[in-house]
Structures are given as C-alpha cells and as structure tokens.
Image (cartoon, grey):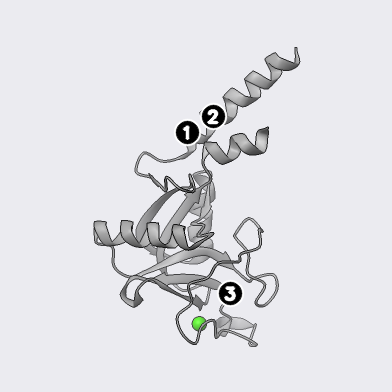
Amino acid sequence: MFILVFIIVFGDLVYETRALCPASSFTNPDSGICYWYNPSLVTATACNTSCVLNGGIIGEIPDENSQLFLMQHFQSVGVTGGIWVGVNDIDAELNFRTWDGYPQSYFNWRLGQPNGYPLDAGATEQDCMAMFTTDNFRWQDKPCGDNYMCLCSYRSCKLKIIIAI
Ligand SMILES: [Ca+2]
C-alpha cells in the first residue's frame, strides 16, 4: 500500500514538472533549473504573476554558473535590454530573497548598486532586481513598477525528486 501510494505521488511529480515547463523553455544542465522569458516589457509584479500562472517564479539565479548560463543564452539569441531577476527585498530592506522567500546569497551587482536604500517608500523605492544586457548583464535594484523583460524559472524534476525522497 505504501509503495503504491509512493509510486503514484512520485509519478505525479514527474508528470507535473514536465507539463509546467513551457515548450520554449531552456534548461541549465548543471542546476536542472529551466527558464523561459517573454520579451514584452512588464512590471516585476506582473512578471511574477505570469511566471506563477505557468507554475514558476521570476527567474532564479542562485549562483555564478546560473548567471553565466543565462548570459550565454541571451547573447546567443540576441536579446537586448533589461530583464527582471528573481530577487527582491520587498519585505525587509537589503534582505534579498527569491520571489518564493528563500534567502539569496549570489549577486552580480553593477558597481555602486544596490543604491535604492535607505529610502523605502513610494516611487523611489527600489526593491526589485534587474540585469542589463548592455552592462555585461550586471544587476541593479530598480522600482518594482519599472518595465523590463520577464524571465521565469522552474525548478527541475531532478530537484523535486530529491525533495520528495
Ligand atoms: Ca538602483
């Protein structure tokens, strides 16, 4: 009975993760994280909403390997401009987290960034992160209401299976 239930749950996880990654997604073979993006310019909140609707969150960049993978991908397809990164400090200033609440320890800041503090109110608030292709993909903190391209990510079935075990 236990084994049967486990197989059903296990099978559902594998099926679900495959279905959630859009056909246009691209996967980092090292991390197993799959990414997709929309070149339309949207706010960070709208970006995250669209990512969540597809089962993901704004694109996670947990380490330098992930940053380099994305740089190479966007350079190869010729994408130019600002792209939302899956990090914010909305809840507490300089307490950077992924959009689903995990602490973020990797950053690729432009020199002088982040600079959107200690002001933390109104339109000057800069609690959302974006990377800029024209600045060697370095990051800046920006107002969450700014409009940039939307990168989404979904943790792979490889990571999901580890969690399930
Ligand atoms: Ca800034």
When asked about the image quadrant of residue 2, the answer is: top right
**Residue type at the position of mark 2:** Val
Q: Residue at x 54, y 49 (%)?
A: 52
Q: Residue at x 52, y 77 (%)?
A: 141
Q: Residue at x 58, y 26 (%)?
A: 12
**Residue type at the position of mark 3:** Asp
**How far across and how far down the image is residue 130, in percent?**
46, 70
**How far across and how far down the image is residue 21, in percent?**
45, 40
Disc 3 secondary structure class: loop
Q: Residue at x 39, y 61 (%)?
A: 68
Classed neighbour count for the residue bearing mark 3: other residues with Cα under 10 Å, few (<14), some (14–19), many (≥20)? many
Horizontal side, residue 87 vs residue 66: left or right: right
Q: Are dots 1 and 2 in contact, CB under 8 Å?
A: yes
Q: Nearer the viewer, residue 158 or 34?
A: 158
Q: Which residue is mark 2?
A: 14
Residue 127 is labelled as 3
Dot 2 or dot 3, earlier in sequence: 2
Q: Are dots 1 and 3 in contact, CB under 8 Å?
A: no
Classed neighbour count for the residue bearing mark 1: other residues with Cα under 10 Å, few (<14), some (14–19), many (≥20)? few
Disc 2 secondary structure class: helix
Q: Which residue is mark 1?
A: 18
